[in-house]
């Protein structure tokens, strides 16, 4: 049986990954690492907390894990400062993957974004592309990036623009190509867990493929 670690378990996708792993018989222990502990108890759950900007001080969380799930990120509404935004969306995932590399972790699954490209003129897309490029260079056997489109699911904060977009994309979803369809966060989470239990070496999965991966999940 395996041990997994989640970065971003308090988020929309990370929360679903956590629930899936706790219910999955392939995992004996599920660890989460965040700024603060969650109000959640389970016999398989181990919680680590600390300053994620000082990831090297949290190396104990990575020792002995088989799979790392990185589902951490912020929004412009939460983080207007671009320097801080980059530190969260780029710095934390790369630092977490580096700790995984040093700990000998075999599988890393990362939530990226549709349009990720280090050369993009769009700030958000550029960060995601830089993050993918940095992690890809690491000596980790299996690295999987998923690039979901607009996410569906309940959030703690209100996002009016995304809410309107989600309504339009679900109402007229039959007109939208599969790679651009709005996708439930739980579907993305199921795909991530599926990927962690396959050998793909280093691969990027587009939105349409994420739907298929979730259907074929264990």
Image (cartoon, rainbow, N blue to C red):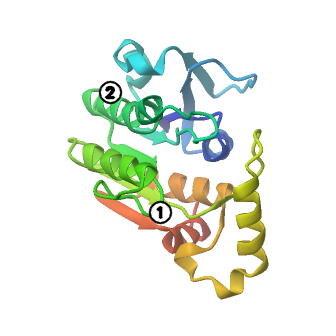
Q: Mark 2 and mark 1 in contact? Answer it, CB < 8 Å.
A: no
Q: Secondary structure at mark 1?
A: loop
Of residues 121 and 147, the one drawn nearer to the viewer in this rendering: 121
Q: Quadrant of residue 30?
A: top right
Mark 1: give few (<14), some (14-19) or many (20+) Cα within 10 Å. some
The x and y percentages for residue 127 are: 38, 46
| Foreground disc of the pair 2, 1 | 1
Element class at badge 2: helix
* Residue 207 vertical position relative to residue 152 in the rendered view, above or below: below
From the image, which quarter does the C terminus lie in?
Answer: bottom right
At 57% from the left edge and 63% from the top edge, which residue is drawn? 217
**Is there any visible trace of residue 57 in the rendered image?**
yes
Residue placed at 42% from the left, 65% from the top?
205
The residue indicated by pointer 1 is: 114
Task: Let me know if residue 197 appears in the view.
Answer: no
Q: Mark 2 highlights which residue?
A: 99
Q: Residue at x 63, y 34 (%)?
A: 78
User: Residue sitting at 71 percent across and 66 percent down?
Assistant: 165
Residue 195, horizontal then vertical, whole percent:
45, 57
> Label 2 to label 1, Cα distance in Å?
26 Å
182 sits to left or right of 39: left
Mark toward the start of the polypeptide (2 vs 1):
2
Q: Is residue 147 left or right of residue 132?
A: right
Residue 115: % across, % down: 43, 63
List x then y, in percent, for residue 157: 75, 40
* Quadrant housing residue 46: top right
Left or right: residue 102 compared with residue 83: left
Give above or below for 142 relative to 46: below
Q: For this rendering, which residue is in front, 139 or 135? A: 135
């Amino acid at each position: 049986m395996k041990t997994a670690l989640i970065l971003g378990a308090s988020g929309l996708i990370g929360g679903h990954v956590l629930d899936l792993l706790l219910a999955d018989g392939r995992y004996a222990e599920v660890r989460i690492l965040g700024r603060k502990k969650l109000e959640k108890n389970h016999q398989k759950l181990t919680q680590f907390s600390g300053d994620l900007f000082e990831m090297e001080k949290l190396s104990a969380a990575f020792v002995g894990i088989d799979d790392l799930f990185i589902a951490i990120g912020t929004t412009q509404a939460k983080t207007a400062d671009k320097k801080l935004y980059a530190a969260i969306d780029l710095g934390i995932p790369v630092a977490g993957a580096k700790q995984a590399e040093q700990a000998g972790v075999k599988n890393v699954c990362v939530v990226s974004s549709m349009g990720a490209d280090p050369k993009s003129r769009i700030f958000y897309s550029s960060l995601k592309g830089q993050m993918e490029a940095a992690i890809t260079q690491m000596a980790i056997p299996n690295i999987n990036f998923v690039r979901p489109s607009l996410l569906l699911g309940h959030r703690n904060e209100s996002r009016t623009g995304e809410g309107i977009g989600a309504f339009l994309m679900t109402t007229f979803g039959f007109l939208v190509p599969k790679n651009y369809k709005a996708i439930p966060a739980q579907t993305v989470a199921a795909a991530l867990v599926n990927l962690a239990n396959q050998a793909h070496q280093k691969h990027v999965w587009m939105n349409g493929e994420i739907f298929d991966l979730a259907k074929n999940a264990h």
